[in-house]
Image: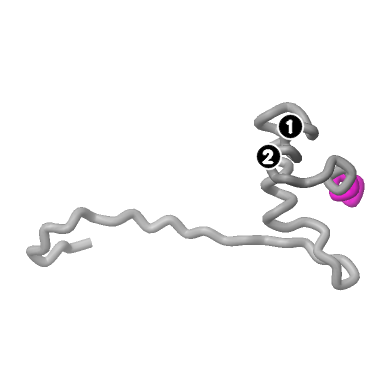
Amino acid sequence: MPNHGRSQPEQTVKPKFKVWVVFDDRVKFGDGRARLLERIDELGSIKKAVAQFGMSYRNAWGYLRDFE
């Protein structure tokens, strides 16, 4: 892309998008649940992950059961 004499550095464009799965008008999988799964994967523990989110273990377990 031409700079046209400007001294600004080139910017990299990074497209981002969000996806959610809905069944019977209920969100089954979205950004929050994806972040929870990522944190569980990083920490290797549901208990540690929910502590960082300030979420109860029972609530998180309910989310995970919805995936079955």
Q: Position of residue 65 (x, y in %)?
A: 91, 46
Which residue is nearer to you in this view: 40 or 51?
51
The numbered disc on residue 67 is none
Q: Residue at x 24, y 55 (%)?
A: 10
Q: Amino acid at mark 2?
A: Gln
Q: Residue at x 90, y 70 (%)?
A: 24
Q: Which residue is mark 2?
A: 52
In-image side of 41 versus 5 (left or right): right
Q: Which residue is mark 1?
A: 48
Q: Position of residue 22 (x, y in %)?
A: 81, 66
The answer to whether the residue labelled 1 contacts the one labelled 2, judged by CB atoms less than 8 Å apart, is yes
Q: How is the image coloured?
A: one colour
Q: Which residues are magenta?
A: 62-68
Q: From the image, which quarter does the N terminus lie in?
A: bottom left
Q: Check residue 66 for magenta coloring.
A: yes
- Residue 51 in sight: yes
Q: Position of residue 63 (x, y in %)?
A: 85, 49
In-image side of 3 versus 11 (left or right): left
Q: Quadrant of residue 50?
A: top right
Q: Is residue 6 above or below residue 57?
A: below
